[in-house]
Image (tube, grey):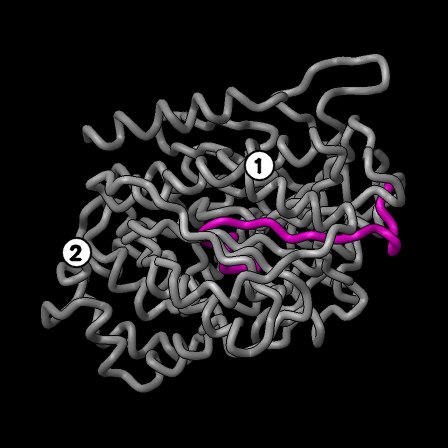
Amino acid sequence: MPLLARLLPVAVAMTAACLGVRTVPAAADTGSDPVVSRGVTIPAFYNPPVTLPTADGALIRSEPLPLALSLPSIPGPLPGRATRLMYKSTDSGGRPVAVTGAYIEPAAAWPAGGARPLVALAPGTMGQGDQCAASMGLEHPLLLNGETVSVGYEDLAIYRLLAEGVAVVVTDYVGLGTTDRLHTYVNRLDGAHAVLDAVRAARALDGASVTSASRVGLFGYSQGGGATAAAAELQPAYAPDVALAGTYSGAPPADLTEVTRAIDGSDLAGALGWAVNGFLQSDPALKPIAEAHLNAAGMAALADLSTMCVGDALFAYGSVHSTAWTNDGRSLGDIIQSEPALRDYLEEQRIGTSTPASPVRVATGVNDDLVPHAQARRLAVDWCRAGADITYVPVVLPNAGRALLNHFGPLLTDQGAAVAWLTARLSGMPAVSDCWTMPAQP
């Protein structure tokens, strides 16, 4: 509880520090009763239609999105005008899927000349309940109703980019917000596809200033860092029409085997449940294995976590060990290693096996023991060995004594430099790889 008392005011203050269109007709699937998640009624907009478009990135529907943190001005609201989006993507099984998000047209002019650039922002861990979606966080930066706690902490990075005159499109990821399935947390392909297809959707939005001539950047930390890293790898094959100028990948969970062990028993132990829920959503064939190993407490935790946001999980599952969720008292990490199907699934999620064709800035806190520093550094090493253009940034901060603080600190202290690096790429300035320094870098 002392940790939560320290973290929540920080998150609220960070959100408060931020500043605070036309539609593509497509009827919401309103044939079912409204979805209510922990006391929050999910808007009908988030109910996907039965039939989806064929093309990845095709707009399904859009509507104006009121920004909670916004100021009136003569040229228009500051920092810009927001539009809620639903667009088509493809999941890891090759199936069509509807994804939601938001596009923000900045009021600030782009000072570097040429077409206004676009950044696709991949949010960090928000949770698994539909009410946790980042697009809803733009409208409700702090959601606190006695049943759920959600903080739109990504609003700070979004507003920083908008202040630079950069248009921003935010993805909610597969299954987060949309009411037809569970969020496939940290699924490499789902995350990458959702990010890249968000770019396509933004360019197709009527009234948006971005076009196919706009330089594109990707920005993400933690879960978002994994999604942007995977997107940078997959872009040449999946989205060759999206010409990336640069990608920021902060604290990427590149190796889920190591990350699983690190978060077990940590402040964010609830993320284990989100990951397992996501695995079972993506590959139902894994369900019998999970049922064979999880006890009643484990199954109840998965169901409980499936509707939780980060704040909820901190309160309810902080410092919980997965040994309490299994029939034989083994940890989930040990069970994964003993089950070939689970081991293979996590290996398929490994980021770093393909080579990005555009510059990537990889940043990781040297004392990050939640999304372990070593595996994030190894991603940079793997890419450097493959000949990628990598800027590696070890963020040196004192050990805070708590895993979540060690992970959260670099998000704030490095964010300004990350925005500046990406803005330089969007301005046309070339990146300078520092792969040659890796042997001397922590």
- Residue 281, how many percent across, how many down? 46, 67
Q: Secondary structure at mark 1?
A: helix
- Residue 239 badge: none
- Residue 170, how many percent across, how many down? 64, 45
Residue sitting farthest toward the left:
329
- Is 203 displayed left or right of 357 in the figure? right
Q: Is residue 253 above or below residue 385?
A: above
- Is 24 displayed left or right of 327 in the figure? right
Residue 181 makes an appearance in the image:
no
Quarter of the image where one finds residue 230: bottom right
* Distance CA(mark 2)–CA(mark 1): 32 Å
Residue found at x 65% / y 41%: 44
Q: Is residue 38 above or below residue 245?
A: above
Q: Secondary structure at mark 2?
A: loop
Q: Quadrant of the N terminus?
A: top left
The part of the chain drawn in magenta is: 209-228
Camera-side residue of 238 and 214: 214
Task: Characterize the local packing of mark 1: few (<14), some (14-19) or many (20 or more) Cα atoms within 10 angstroms.
Answer: many
- Is 73 displayed left or right of 434 in the figure? right
Task: Characterize the local packing of mark 2: few (<14), some (14-19) or many (20 or more) Cα atoms within 10 angstroms.
Answer: some
Q: Nearer the viewer, mark 2 or mark 1?
A: 1
Camera-side residue of 234 and 427: 427
Q: Which badge, 2 or 1, comes first in the chain's sequence?
A: 1
Q: Amino acid at mark 2?
A: His
Quarter of the image where one finds residue 53: bottom right
Residue bearing the label numbered 1: 157
- Residue 321 badge: 2
Q: Is residue 219 above or below residue 258?
A: above
Camera-side residue of 40 and 425: 425
Q: Quadrant of the C terminus?
A: bottom left
Judge whether residue 292 is colored magenta.
no
Q: Amino acid at mark 1?
A: Ala
